[in-house]
Amino acid sequence: MTGPLSPSTWSAPVPLRLATDTSRYGGKSSQLAAAAGAGLPVPEGIALEWLFVDAVAAGDDEALAALHLSTADLQGGGGLAVRSSALGEDSAAASFAGQHLTCLNVRGPDGLTEAVRMVRDSAHSAAALAYRERLGLPGRPRVAVVVQELVVPECAGVLFSRDPLDGSDVLVIEASWGLGEAVVSGLVVPDHYRVRRDGRVIERTAGMKDLAVEPAPAGGTSQVPVPADRVHRLCLDETRLESLRELTARCEQVFGGTQDLEWAFAADRLRLLQRRPMTGAVPPH
Protein backbone atom coordinates (compact mmCIF):
# COMPACT_ATOMS: atom_id res chain seq x y z
CA MET A 1 0.00 0.00 0.00
CA THR A 2 1.24 3.46 -0.83
CA GLY A 3 0.42 6.16 1.75
CA PRO A 4 -0.34 9.83 1.19
CA LEU A 5 3.17 11.14 1.78
CA SER A 6 5.84 11.31 -0.92
CA PRO A 7 9.65 11.49 -0.79
CA SER A 8 9.35 15.18 -1.58
CA THR A 9 7.58 15.56 1.79
CA TRP A 10 9.86 13.50 4.04
CA SER A 11 13.62 13.07 4.33
CA ALA A 12 15.34 9.69 4.62
CA PRO A 13 16.87 8.61 7.93
CA VAL A 14 20.23 10.11 8.91
CA PRO A 15 23.06 8.90 11.17
CA LEU A 16 22.16 9.78 14.74
CA ARG A 17 25.08 12.20 15.15
CA LEU A 18 23.57 14.41 12.41
CA ALA A 19 20.09 14.66 13.98
CA THR A 20 20.64 18.03 15.65
CA ASP A 21 17.46 19.77 14.43
CA THR A 22 14.91 19.39 17.21
CA SER A 23 12.08 20.64 14.97
CA ARG A 24 12.55 17.56 12.76
CA TYR A 25 14.12 14.91 14.98
CA GLY A 26 12.84 15.79 18.46
CA GLY A 27 14.56 16.17 21.79
CA LYS A 28 15.91 12.69 22.39
CA SER A 29 17.61 12.48 18.99
CA SER A 30 19.15 15.94 19.26
CA GLN A 31 20.45 15.25 22.76
CA LEU A 32 22.06 12.00 21.63
CA ALA A 33 23.41 13.68 18.48
CA ALA A 34 25.13 16.33 20.58
CA ALA A 35 26.48 13.66 22.93
CA ALA A 36 27.82 11.56 20.05
CA GLY A 37 29.35 14.65 18.45
CA ALA A 38 31.18 15.38 21.70
CA GLY A 39 32.64 11.88 21.79
CA LEU A 40 30.40 10.51 24.54
CA PRO A 41 29.82 6.73 24.42
CA VAL A 42 26.50 6.67 22.54
CA PRO A 43 25.58 3.44 20.69
CA GLU A 44 25.47 3.67 16.89
CA GLY A 45 22.10 4.51 15.44
CA ILE A 46 19.96 6.47 13.03
CA ALA A 47 17.28 9.12 13.45
CA LEU A 48 13.91 9.23 11.68
CA GLU A 49 12.29 12.64 11.30
CA TRP A 50 8.64 12.88 12.27
CA LEU A 51 7.35 13.24 8.69
CA PHE A 52 9.21 10.06 7.74
CA VAL A 53 7.71 8.25 10.74
CA ASP A 54 4.24 9.35 9.58
CA ALA A 55 5.04 7.96 6.12
CA VAL A 56 6.13 4.61 7.58
CA ALA A 57 2.98 4.46 9.68
CA ALA A 58 0.90 5.18 6.56
CA GLY A 59 2.49 2.25 4.73
CA ASP A 60 4.38 4.36 2.18
CA ASP A 61 6.36 1.85 0.10
CA GLU A 62 9.32 4.15 -0.54
CA ALA A 63 9.55 5.13 3.12
CA LEU A 64 9.51 1.47 4.15
CA ALA A 65 12.29 0.68 1.67
CA ALA A 66 14.35 3.63 2.96
CA LEU A 67 13.84 2.51 6.56
CA HIS A 68 15.04 -1.02 5.92
CA LEU A 69 18.00 0.13 3.83
CA SER A 70 19.15 2.61 6.46
CA THR A 71 19.16 0.00 9.23
CA ALA A 72 20.84 -2.81 7.31
CA ASP A 73 24.23 -2.12 8.88
CA LEU A 74 22.75 -1.91 12.38
CA GLN A 75 21.08 -5.32 12.12
CA GLY A 76 24.34 -7.25 12.12
CA GLY A 77 22.98 -10.26 13.94
CA GLY A 78 21.75 -8.34 16.97
CA GLY A 79 18.57 -6.64 17.98
CA LEU A 80 17.68 -2.97 17.81
CA ALA A 81 16.30 -0.47 20.30
CA VAL A 82 13.50 1.72 18.91
CA ARG A 83 12.62 4.78 20.99
CA SER A 84 10.37 7.81 20.63
CA SER A 85 11.84 11.26 20.08
CA ALA A 86 8.69 13.33 19.94
CA LEU A 87 8.96 17.07 19.40
CA GLY A 88 8.92 18.63 22.86
CA GLU A 89 10.13 15.41 24.52
CA ASP A 90 13.18 15.37 26.82
CA SER A 91 13.13 19.13 27.29
CA ALA A 92 13.77 21.00 30.52
CA ALA A 93 10.00 21.30 31.01
CA ALA A 94 8.79 17.87 29.89
CA SER A 95 10.59 14.54 29.92
CA PHE A 96 7.66 12.34 28.79
CA ALA A 97 9.47 9.56 30.68
CA GLY A 98 7.21 6.50 30.70
CA GLN A 99 4.62 8.09 28.41
CA HIS A 100 5.89 6.80 25.07
CA LEU A 101 6.70 3.23 24.12
CA THR A 102 10.23 1.85 23.78
CA CYS A 103 10.69 -1.40 21.82
CA LEU A 104 13.79 -3.42 22.70
CA ASN A 105 15.43 -6.30 20.82
CA VAL A 106 13.54 -5.55 17.62
CA ARG A 107 14.46 -8.01 14.86
CA GLY A 108 13.92 -8.15 11.12
CA PRO A 109 12.35 -5.69 8.66
CA ASP A 110 8.77 -6.49 9.64
CA GLY A 111 9.59 -6.19 13.33
CA LEU A 112 11.24 -2.82 12.75
CA THR A 113 8.28 -1.47 10.76
CA GLU A 114 5.86 -2.57 13.46
CA ALA A 115 8.04 -1.10 16.22
CA VAL A 116 8.15 2.32 14.52
CA ARG A 117 4.37 2.26 14.13
CA MET A 118 3.84 1.22 17.75
CA VAL A 119 6.14 3.93 19.09
CA ARG A 120 4.32 6.55 17.02
CA ASP A 121 0.92 5.27 18.12
CA SER A 122 1.95 5.36 21.80
CA ALA A 123 2.14 9.16 21.60
CA HIS A 124 -1.57 9.17 20.73
CA SER A 125 -2.60 7.11 23.77
CA ALA A 126 -5.03 8.65 26.24
CA ALA A 127 -2.33 8.95 28.91
CA ALA A 128 0.20 10.60 26.59
CA LEU A 129 -2.38 13.03 25.21
CA ALA A 130 -3.50 13.93 28.73
CA TYR A 131 0.14 14.60 29.67
CA ARG A 132 0.49 16.90 26.66
CA GLU A 133 -2.68 18.73 27.67
CA ARG A 134 -1.41 19.25 31.24
CA LEU A 135 1.77 20.77 29.83
CA GLY A 136 -0.16 22.99 27.45
CA LEU A 137 1.52 21.55 24.35
CA PRO A 138 -0.45 22.55 21.25
CA GLY A 139 -1.45 20.45 18.25
CA ARG A 140 -1.17 16.76 17.54
CA PRO A 141 1.94 14.81 18.54
CA ARG A 142 4.80 14.83 16.07
CA VAL A 143 6.84 11.71 16.75
CA ALA A 144 10.37 11.26 15.48
CA VAL A 145 12.16 8.00 16.30
CA VAL A 146 15.64 6.85 17.31
CA VAL A 147 16.83 3.42 16.15
CA GLN A 148 20.03 2.14 17.78
CA GLU A 149 22.05 -0.99 18.25
CA LEU A 150 20.71 -2.79 21.32
CA VAL A 151 23.25 -2.77 24.15
CA VAL A 152 23.03 -6.07 26.05
CA PRO A 153 24.42 -5.10 29.45
CA GLU A 154 25.52 -6.87 32.57
CA CYS A 155 23.88 -4.05 34.51
CA ALA A 156 22.13 -0.79 33.75
CA GLY A 157 20.20 2.00 35.38
CA VAL A 158 19.67 5.71 35.83
CA LEU A 159 21.67 8.62 37.22
CA PHE A 160 20.67 12.08 38.45
CA SER A 161 23.27 14.80 38.84
CA ARG A 162 21.39 16.21 41.84
CA ASP A 163 19.29 14.46 44.44
CA PRO A 164 15.77 14.68 42.96
CA LEU A 165 14.23 14.66 46.45
CA ASP A 166 16.11 17.43 48.24
CA GLY A 167 18.19 19.10 45.51
CA SER A 168 21.51 18.39 47.22
CA ASP A 169 24.62 18.44 45.05
CA VAL A 170 25.31 14.70 44.91
CA LEU A 171 24.97 12.09 42.20
CA VAL A 172 22.10 9.66 42.77
CA ILE A 173 22.45 6.33 40.94
CA GLU A 174 20.09 3.35 40.71
CA ALA A 175 21.20 0.09 39.14
CA SER A 176 20.07 -3.46 38.47
CA TRP A 177 21.14 -6.51 36.49
CA GLY A 178 20.28 -6.82 32.80
CA LEU A 179 18.48 -4.19 30.74
CA GLY A 180 17.59 -0.92 32.43
CA GLU A 181 13.89 -1.57 31.85
CA ALA A 182 13.87 -3.34 35.23
CA VAL A 183 14.76 -0.02 36.90
CA VAL A 184 12.74 2.48 34.86
CA SER A 185 9.61 0.28 34.95
CA GLY A 186 9.88 -0.35 38.70
CA LEU A 187 10.13 -4.13 38.34
CA VAL A 188 12.79 -4.42 41.06
CA VAL A 189 14.11 -2.50 44.04
CA PRO A 190 17.42 -1.35 42.51
CA ASP A 191 20.74 -0.74 44.19
CA HIS A 192 20.94 2.85 45.40
CA TYR A 193 24.08 5.00 45.54
CA ARG A 194 24.84 8.58 46.47
CA VAL A 195 28.23 9.88 45.30
CA ARG A 196 29.86 13.21 46.06
CA ARG A 197 31.47 15.37 43.38
CA ASP A 198 34.92 14.33 44.55
CA GLY A 199 34.04 10.67 43.99
CA ARG A 200 33.45 9.73 47.61
CA VAL A 201 30.59 7.25 47.96
CA ILE A 202 28.40 8.38 50.86
CA GLU A 203 25.67 5.77 50.47
CA ARG A 204 25.38 2.37 48.85
CA THR A 205 22.33 0.24 49.53
CA ALA A 206 21.81 -3.15 47.92
CA GLY A 207 18.41 -3.62 46.36
CA MET A 208 16.14 -6.62 45.88
CA LYS A 209 17.02 -7.50 42.29
CA ASP A 210 15.28 -10.84 41.97
CA LEU A 211 14.62 -10.60 38.24
CA ALA A 212 16.34 -9.21 35.19
CA VAL A 213 14.97 -8.07 31.85
CA GLU A 214 16.94 -9.83 29.09
CA PRO A 215 16.66 -10.03 25.28
CA ALA A 216 14.53 -13.00 24.20
CA PRO A 217 15.95 -15.26 21.45
CA ALA A 218 13.07 -14.62 19.05
CA GLY A 219 12.92 -10.88 19.71
CA GLY A 220 11.51 -8.69 22.43
CA THR A 221 12.42 -9.19 26.07
CA SER A 222 11.66 -11.57 28.89
CA GLN A 223 11.90 -11.40 32.66
CA VAL A 224 14.27 -14.02 34.02
CA PRO A 225 15.04 -14.97 37.64
CA VAL A 226 18.32 -13.70 39.07
CA PRO A 227 20.49 -16.32 40.83
CA ALA A 228 20.08 -16.13 44.60
CA ASP A 229 23.68 -15.06 45.21
CA ARG A 230 23.21 -11.98 42.97
CA VAL A 231 19.85 -10.74 44.26
CA HIS A 232 21.46 -8.59 46.98
CA ARG A 233 24.90 -8.24 45.41
CA LEU A 234 25.80 -4.67 44.44
CA CYS A 235 26.03 -4.11 40.67
CA LEU A 236 28.57 -1.29 40.77
CA ASP A 237 32.08 -1.35 42.19
CA GLU A 238 34.35 1.66 42.72
CA THR A 239 35.65 1.56 39.14
CA ARG A 240 32.18 1.63 37.62
CA LEU A 241 31.01 4.36 39.97
CA GLU A 242 34.01 6.46 38.97
CA SER A 243 33.20 5.89 35.29
CA LEU A 244 29.66 7.15 35.90
CA ARG A 245 30.96 10.19 37.78
CA GLU A 246 33.28 11.01 34.86
CA LEU A 247 30.45 10.56 32.36
CA THR A 248 28.30 12.98 34.37
CA ALA A 249 31.07 15.57 34.41
CA ARG A 250 31.46 15.28 30.63
CA CYS A 251 27.71 15.65 30.10
CA GLU A 252 27.73 18.76 32.27
CA GLN A 253 30.52 20.21 30.12
CA VAL A 254 28.60 19.50 26.91
CA PHE A 255 25.06 20.38 27.99
CA GLY A 256 25.29 22.40 31.19
CA GLY A 257 22.55 22.25 33.80
CA THR A 258 21.30 19.10 35.46
CA GLN A 259 21.59 15.59 34.04
CA ASP A 260 19.11 12.71 33.93
CA LEU A 261 21.01 9.82 32.34
CA GLU A 262 20.21 6.26 31.36
CA TRP A 263 23.33 4.13 31.10
CA ALA A 264 24.52 0.54 30.74
CA PHE A 265 27.71 -1.45 31.32
CA ALA A 266 28.38 -4.14 28.70
CA ALA A 267 31.63 -6.05 29.25
CA ASP A 268 32.75 -3.21 31.53
CA ARG A 269 32.22 -0.69 28.71
CA LEU A 270 29.98 2.18 29.78
CA ARG A 271 27.37 3.32 27.26
CA LEU A 272 25.14 6.40 27.40
CA LEU A 273 21.63 5.41 26.30
CA GLN A 274 19.62 8.57 26.97
CA ARG A 275 20.26 12.06 28.29
CA ARG A 276 17.77 14.73 29.32
CA PRO A 277 17.65 17.64 31.77
CA MET A 278 16.15 16.80 35.14
CA THR A 279 12.52 17.88 35.49
CA GLY A 280 10.51 18.34 38.65
CA ALA A 281 13.55 18.26 40.92
CA VAL A 282 13.79 20.23 44.15
CA PRO A 283 15.89 23.37 43.51
CA PRO A 284 19.44 23.22 44.90
CA HIS A 285 20.00 24.65 48.37
Image (spheres, rainbow, N blue to C red):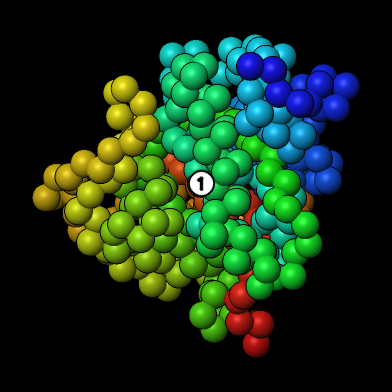
Q: On the image, numbered disc 1 is attached to which residue?
A: 101
Identify which residue is drawn at 45% across, 69% down: 194
Most foreground residue, 61 or 115: 61
Looking at the image, can residue 70 be seen?
A: no
List the single residue furthest toward the left: 228
Q: Is residue 276 above or below residue 47?
A: below
Apparent side of residue 58 relative to residue 18 in the rendered image (left or right): left
Instruction: Name the residue type under label 1.
Output: Leu
Q: Position of residue 48 (x, y in %)?
A: 70, 31
Callout 1 environment at 10 Å: few (<14), some (14 to 19), or many (20+)?
some
Residue 202 coordinates in the image, percent (x, y): 42, 73
Q: Quadrant of the C terminus?
A: bottom right
- Residue 178, position in %: x, y? 33, 42
Snapshot quadrant of residue 152: top left
Closer to us: 223 or 191? 223
Compared with residue 56, is residue 265 higher up or lower down, i.e. above or below? below
Does 185 sit left or right of 196 as displayed?
left
